[in-house]
Image: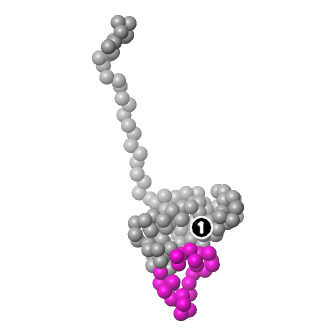
């Protein structure tokens, strides 16, 4: 119940400002910095940064010799998204991490690395376009 001292409500509705829609850009996302030559180079960089971070290094933007268009976590996020959408399998991730830490792709000529090389190529057939779309790799 309202008290007699309360002011009456106005009959006119409040004036609403029109909302402004954000236009979608047709071109891919571009950030400042030099993109990687390829998806493999971006992967090796991200794994190396992640290992350094696990060892206690402080990873900060803009501190490297070459300014990059992303953070190491952005590359890892692309791989994680592909895994969560079931485009990459657990075997792909094992190969990516193992050879990423070695800083070299598996060699197809070595008998023990032939399966790993096939998984490596399958993974980068998916990772490459995703990183190019984001402007991380050329």
Q: Indicate the position of residue 118 as horizontal and vertical percent values.
A: 47, 84
Which structural element holds mark 1?
A: helix
Q: Indicate the position of residue 15 as horizontal and vertical percent values.
A: 35, 25
Tell which of 61 and 96 is nearer to you.
96
Question: What span is colored magenta in the figure?
Answer: 94-119
Q: Is residue 82 above or below residue 8?
A: below
Quarter of the rendering containing residue 4: top left
The residue sitting at 43% across, 65% down in the picture is 84
The residue sitting at 36% across, 29% down in the picture is 16
Q: Residue furthest left?
A: 11
Quarter of the rendering containing residue 69: bottom right
Q: Visible in this render: residue 115?
A: yes
Counting labels gives 1
Residue 25 located left or right of residue 13: right
Magenta span includes 15 = no
Q: Indicate the position of residue 30 as horizontal and vertical percent values.
A: 52, 58
Residue behind mark 1: 46
Tell which of 80 and 27 is nearer to you.
80
């Amino acid at each position: 119940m309202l008290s007699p001292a309360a002011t009456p409500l106005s009959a006119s509705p409040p004036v609403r400002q029109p909302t402004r829609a954000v236009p979608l850009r047709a071109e891919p996302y571009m950030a400042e910095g030099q993109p990687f030559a390829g998806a493999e180079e971006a992967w090796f960089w991200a794994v190396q940064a992640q290992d350094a971070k696990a060892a206690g290094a402080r990873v900060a933007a803009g501190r490297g010799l070459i300014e990059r268009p992303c953070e190491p976590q952005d590359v890892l996020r692309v791989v994680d998204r592909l895994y969560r959408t079931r485009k990459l399998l657990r075997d792909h991730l094992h190969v990516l991490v193992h050879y990423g830490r070695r800083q070299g792709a598996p060699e197809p000529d070595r008998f023990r690395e032939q399966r790993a090389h096939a998984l490596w190529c399958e993974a980068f057939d998916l990772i490459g376009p995703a990183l190019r779309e984001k402007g991380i790799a050329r």
